[in-house]
Amino acid sequence: MAGGSHGESCLVTEANFNECGGFGHRSNTDPDLCFTMAAMSSSIDRRVRLRPELVSFGRAVGLPSILSASLGLACSVSPEPDNPFVSGGTVAEPTSSAGTVVPDGSSGGSTMALDGSGSSAAATAGDGPKLDVASQDVGTPGQEFCNFVDILFVIDNSLSMDEYQLALALAWPSFVDEMWANLPAGTDLHVGMTTTAFYNGSCSEFYFNCQTTASDSAILSRYITPDMGTTAGNGEQGRLFEWQGQRYFSATVGDDSTAFKDWFSGAAVAAGETGCSFEMMSAAAGYAFHPANAMANEGFLRDEGAVLVVVVLTDEPDKSPEGAMTYYDMIVDAKAGCGGDQCVIVTGLVNQCIEGVNNGLWQFFNLFPGFTGTGSIEEPLDYAQVVGSALAEVIGETCDQIPPAG
């Protein structure tokens, strides 16, 4: 159902939500609208059994807004949900994780085992979560701040991810508010997302002790890079996910942020669970900036004068087969004019097992000086920290150190 097709009633409000009977019921208010809300409600009801704290919050305060954003139904400014991961006005400390990566002593030619357990060149061993990068030497004292901030979300769209996508959608509006508070007025922001799929077809896969049970050949057969061919799937192979006719959304700090909040909250939920279960997180982050995707992703990335933020959302270990350094190089090459990895911040809400086995995603994170640590995808309170005030402060501090474009 297209936005605006029902006039005033196309905005999902508390009133028409209740008139439709709430979850899973219909009335004579607007049959199409009620049917659409009932379909979404049925999906959300399933999450009650998995994570009741997420949905109980949505029922109480945020569900009409999230339905409106994720279904693209809002005709006017919709109410924003409060941050569901803040309790009593304080944010709990995240289950953050940072540690060592086993270096292989090489650069540019390192590889990892196809099960994600190999090694690669890494950042300094023993580093903890880097929540403050103000000490990094980017530019010279007294220069102006950055012009731009580009935020790329890598969202796992395989089965089991819908509850986590909803949690991210709920956390996003508060994160935007924090960026508005930490970035200079006039800073130009882009937000976009890609998914973890590199294959369209049969994708049954399992993992045990944070290691995939799939063979190397099975992984490679489900890894089609965009320079080899296209899967044609929305948001696959590093292409930006198209939502409401846009591959990314722009906003300016200081302007009204409602549309910026609504667009990404809707996109995050729309990613869905139809993607291949051979999740390729670091490959998706890298190939988003590969020349093969230059046309699909045109306009999203700014090089000079811009902070790039990469946020990963996944509940499984990475199966990207080319090695963490390969994907790191793709990103650094795209940011060469700004200063390479000094202009990049990486973080994620992930399965915390990846550190213990030195999974490829953990290696990828640790290659960047601007790695701010990770939070647990299973812990709602971690969302407010990883995608919240701490990250917004790091973005603001990094922006202060990057000279403007031109």
Image (spheres, helix red, strand yellow):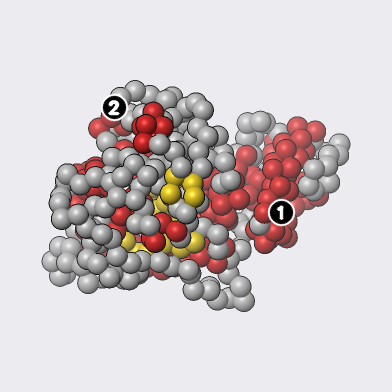
- In the figure, is residue 188 to the left or right of 9? left
- Label 2 sits on a secondary structure element that is loop
Residue placed under numbered mark 2 in the picture: 227
* Horizontal and vertical percent position of residue 171: 54, 58
Q: CA distance from mark 2 to mark 1?
A: 41 Å
Q: Nearer the viewer, residue 328 or 297?
A: 328
* Horizontal and vertical percent position of residue 298: 32, 34
Residue located at (15% from left, 70% from top): 141
Residue located at (61% from left, 50% from top): 163
Q: Amino acid at mark 1?
A: Val
Q: In the rendered image of this protein, does residue 246 appear above or below residue 209?
A: above
N-terminal of the pair, mark 2 or mark 1, is 1
* Horizontal and vertical percent position of residue 316: 48, 49
Q: Which quadrant would residue 215 be assigned to in this image?
A: top left
Residue located at (15% from left, 63% from top): 139
Residue placed under numbered mark 1 in the picture: 48
Asked whether residue 3 appears in the rendered view, the answer is yes
Q: Amino acid at mark 2?
A: Asp
Asked whether residue 180 appears in the rendered view, the answer is no
- In the figure, is residue 233 to the left or right of 223? right
Q: Return the residue found at the far right.
A: 28
Q: Nearer the viewer, residue 112 or 238?
A: 112
Q: In the rendered image of this protein, does residue 226 appear above or below residue 23?
A: above
Q: How many marks?
A: 2
* Horizontal and vertical percent position of residue 406: 16, 49
Q: Residues within 10 Å of mark 2 (few under 14, many from 20)?
A: few
- In the figure, is residue 335 to the left or right of 193? left
- Label 1 sits on a secondary structure element that is helix
Q: Residues within 10 Å of mark 1 (few under 14, many from 20)?
A: some
- In the figure, is residue 107 to the left or right of 16? left
